[in-house]
Image (tube, rainbow, N blue to C red):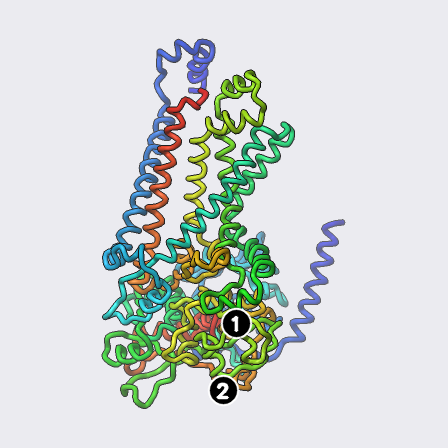
Amino acid sequence: MEQENASVLIPQKTSPITSFYTKPRKPFKEIIIERILLLLTILSSILIFFVMFFVISKAVPVLKASGFNFVFSGGWDDIFSKAWQAGADQPVWRFGALPLIAGTVLATSGALVFCFTFGLGCAVFIEEICPAWLRKPLKSTVRLLAAIPSVIYGLVGLMTVVPFISKYLISNELSLRMIKICILDGTSLLAGIIVLSMMIGPIFIAMAGDAIKSAPKRYKEASLALGLSHWRTIVKIILPAARNGIVAGAILAAGRAIGEAIALSMVTGSVANLPNPAHGLVFFLEPVRTLASTIVDNAEGMSVAACESALFACGSVLLLTCVLLSLFSRIVSGNLRQGGASNN
Amino acid sequence: MKNRLLVVSLVAILTLLCAQLAFAAGNISVLVNGKALSMDSKPFVTQGKVLVPMRAIFETLGASVKWDGKAQKVTAKKGDVEIALWMGKKEANVGSKSVTLDVAAAVDKGRTVVPLRFVAESLGAEVDWVSDKNTVVITTGGGGAAAAKLTGSLKMSGSTSVQPLAEELTQTFMKENPKVQITVTGGGSGVGISDAADGKVNIGNVSRALKDTDPKGLVATTIAKDAIVIVVNPKNQVGALTTEQVKKIFTGAITNWKEIGGKNAPILVNSRTAPSGTFDFFKEKFLGEDNVVSTAKQHASNGLVRQAVAANENAVGFISMGFVDSSIKAPKLDGVEPTLENAKNGTYKIVRPFVMVTKGSPTGLAKSFLDFVLSSEGQSIVKKEYISIK
């Protein structure tokens, strides 16, 4: 057998063309392995649909009873405790998750703004400006940051960001003035935004960096040859050419931010409070709670059917948002290829 | 050279060990299901653990023993439970799970001795220490692996405070008895009592002692006790609170520490999420029909409340007594220091029993479950957050 295999291999190596035309029969082992891989692929894609079906089917009772009120009305904490205490004969099915959805949107979009401005700068520096010897260590540092588990970010945030905010941004008077509306103790929307942008920053930097790198070289060369400065080339030529890739990166980062539970549960304040923009900048110091952290915080309530269904309803809102975001990022990066930005 | 050193040190260690053992040896007797365990050498205590000759205990408990001299390893098998111990090592395996022992198995006067409690409990027996008689009482049957044959289903309802504990207990019980199905629902202590009296459930969970007005014929088994402590930051000057003040703080009527003898600073209220039994008890004892102020931070566990109070000078919260440590301060409540001792002797009032009630004396699966709850394994689950009754 060994001998035979070797003799088949040699002509392939020396004349690739003949081997291309006379397809040697695949060894049995390979066929088996390929079949197994196919099976696994099918299984994992079925799994995704199964998860979606499961989550949504569990969420149906609450979503059906609450309708659009689930998205547009508040009072989550009160309703949840009522649903928990209710007897089996009169369960509470109508929930309002507005503060949670608002908290999720605010924290995510805040983090996106943060990480878009700083992260884009970082990506441009790494790919275009940074001296060659520094590029590799910088890139691997960014990748390393992306691999840190979120609970670590949460812990660091809780030990550094939260005390910082409570010490330097919240005065005793402010806290006293706001005490009837909400508790200001440092765990806040701002802390959530900072921790989240730390978490999704590395992903965005890596994605944006790849997009910048894959902007066609010839554009850059042409621009420099025409006498534009390097800086102007970056702003006017490279970034526009990489635009779609950068947007796709931002969307993926948003997907991660929306689903983040543990870290935010630790730093955003664990109360379903709807921050009021009328309070000015204090808005950012008010506590919030996101959909994902609500699922973590209230998980103890799972044994009551209504509470369980309400948490799954939060989950299905998250799931749908993430699916939409992922589709959207596919469309955007699809445009990227059509736009001719790909260099192979 | 190296070998000799090894032998010398081994001998030294063994001599020391034996000396210590001989010193600690009292007259300990071991009763298995009421009968004295016959042993060819005396059991003894080391570091608070009773060690007995391996053969005697394993054979009495009906386990087969294998000795692997090369690995210095003892394997005992009973039913589908297999445990493995190594001489002089503090690790042991129960099934595929590895556990750390307080005291390793050893060789004493030519006999291999093993830690009694570990061995007996992993083989599904119950172990009790009667200290005034210097006697270890082992009961086989009932909970643990010996009860693996249990089948059927149980229904429980009642107190939402007992519910988390009941669920944790049932989960462990069901894991050990895969053919048993137990469902736990809430509703409150009242529901637990009426459901149990009506025969709708096998066990009613109640977070108070039974009263005269409760239906007749119910038998209560106290499974645990729970005490709750109000905690503040150690930097807080307030050293004593009254029940009335606590109520005002948590309902938002008092929002400044100044009003109760502290400095001019806001009171940051930390509460628990609704499903928490601790919250339920707190509400019952302090708030009655009133609700916690809606601005209160909601935490998912005692540990998180403690962390939040430890982190902020102006914070206040309530936690189960088992969670009190030096990172926070527990002010006197109505003049009483909230300590475990005061909770046990009844001076500290914020204590309540967790009771499981059955219609008549518990029988069948309900009895097996309650036996498990009262066993040292069940009580070790209780101990995690509540006051064990033993």
The circle on residue B267 is 1
* Label 1 or label 2, whichever comes before in sequence order: 1
Tell me the amino acid under the disc marked 1.
Ile
Q: Position of residue B303 (x, y in %)?
A: 51, 66
Q: Is residue B221 above or below residue B294?
A: below
Judge by depth and name the residue closer to the eye, B108 or B298: B298
Alpha carbon separation for disc pair 1 and 2:
30 Å
Q: Nearer the viewer, mark 1 or mark 2?
A: 1
In front: B161, or A24?
A: B161
Q: Position of residue B89 (x, y in %)?
A: 60, 59
Question: Could you say which disc has been placed on residue B346 in the image?
Answer: 2
User: Residue at position x 67%, y 67% from top?
Assistant: B17
- Image height check: is B360 above or below A89? below
Is disc 1 surrounded by few (<14), some (14 to 19) or many (20+) residues within 10 Å? many
Q: Secondary structure at mark 2?
A: loop
- In terms of depth relative to the viewer, which is nearer, A219 or B53? A219
